[in-house]
Image (cartoon, grey):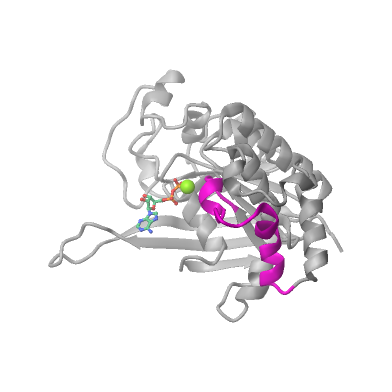
Amino acid sequence: MNNKSEEILEISHVTNRYRDSGTGFFSRSKMTRVLNDVDLTIHRDEIFGLVGESGCGKSTLGKAVLGLIPFDGQIKVAGMEYSRKNRQEFTRCVQAVFQDPLSSLNPRRTIAATLEEPLLAHGIGTPESRRAKAIEMLELVGLDGSYADRLPRELSGGQRQRVCIGAALMIDPELVIADEATSALDVSVGAQILNLFQEIHDRKDFAMLFISHNLNVVYYLCDRIAVMYRGSIVEQGDSESLYNAPMHPYTRTLLSAIPEIEEGDELSRYGYQETRRESAPDGCDFYHRCPFATDQCRQRPELTDVLTDKQGTEKSSEHFVRCWNPVR
Ligand SMILES: Nc1ncnc2c1ncn2[C@@H]1O[C@H](COP(=O)(O)OP(=O)(O)O)[C@@H](O)[C@H]1O
Ligand SMILES: [Mg+2]
């Protein structure tokens, strides 16, 4: 039991398309690919970061894992694939915390009722035991029993997010997805919530997929990181390796705390010439922006292990990059 190498989330070959909005009545509606053959595995007790600029497909991947949208490929949580039949059992395994705590909370429901709801929905415990667990959870998330009978509007943004985190943990899920969970908060409050995730993770047994557009935030919290660009994982590795020695030109553009960067701006910070060329439809997703692109980049590179050729058989770290000419 509790084998740390146990795979809690297994995503293989996941692709997702959305129908383009705005296509007219007579035009054939076009599909836009949002996730492109995503593979990703998260182990028991691990905090895994998914980072990439706004619109790259992070939330779409999170929704696919939660069973909220259809996709091609396979996703397993604790060995289980989502289906309508096992919905109840599946949602016991995976819970989520989102960006905006206010819209996640029912304004008319007391904090205790919000915390008890997942237990009730899964038919767990008695009214007394549920109440007791809610009080215990309030303490775990840094509030206390005095919050139990309050309403969401009486709490600050940070306190509300603490309640959402508590609600996600009430049924002891195997996997927690946090999607931009600190992004709407003031910097100092966001930092407290990050610390809370860390503390709770040290005390409880769950794996976490932590989604953010901010590489600094992800680096602070996560054991491993995957960088997404236009629906593809372009680089993945141990946090230290990826943050301190990024090899994909795109990852270098992300090494900035500025949330919404203009394309091109960040490249120039690294002394790159801004590069504009036509996209290569079957090639590297970063082809049109990359200062190092060659003709070879018109073909899609694989996500390649860059440590194997340098190290022996036993690997304690990993670093993958989807680039023909990784920066070293
Ligand atoms: N329900 C939807 N219908 C159509 N397009 C969508 C829908 N949801 C997201 N998209 C598009 O998919 C892309 C990825 O969105 P999203 O996963 O929310 O990105 P991120 O979370 O990385 O900011 C965006 O271009 C977005 O406009
Ligand atoms: Mg998102």
Is residue 13 found inside the magenta-colored segment of the image? no
Extreme-bottom residue of the structure? 85
Residue 246 visible to an observer of this rendering: no
> Seen in the image, is 1 located left or right of residue 28?
right
Residue located 37% across and 57% down the image: 33
Measured as percent of width and height from the top left, residue 83 is found at 56, 76
> Seen in the image, is 23 located left or right of residue 302?
left
Give the residues in magenta: 97-123
Q: Say how many tags the image has.
A: 0
Is residue 104 found inside the magenta-colored segment of the image? yes
Q: Quadrant of the C terminus?
A: top right
Say if 84 sits above or below 147 in the image. Answer: below
Residue situated in front as seen by the camera: 124 or 175: 124
Say if 155 sits above or below 173 in the image. Answer: above
**Quarter of the view holding residue 286:** top left
Q: Quadrant of the N terminus?
A: bottom right
**Quarter of the view holding residue 176:** bottom right
Residue situated in front as seen by the camera: 295 or 259: 259
Residue located 72% across and 61% down the image: 173
Residue located 43% across and 25% down the image: 266
Measured as percent of width and height from the top left, residue 252 is found at 51, 29
**Quarter of the view holding residue 53:** top left
Residue situated in front as seen by the camera: 304 or 289: 289
Say if 5 sits above or below 181 in the image. Answer: below
Residue 218 visible to an observer of this rendering: yes
Measured as percent of width and height from the top left, residue 267 is found at 42, 25
> Seen in the image, is 65 located left or right of residue 229?
right
Measured as percent of width and height from the top left, residue 157 is found at 58, 39
Extreme-left residue of the structure? 26
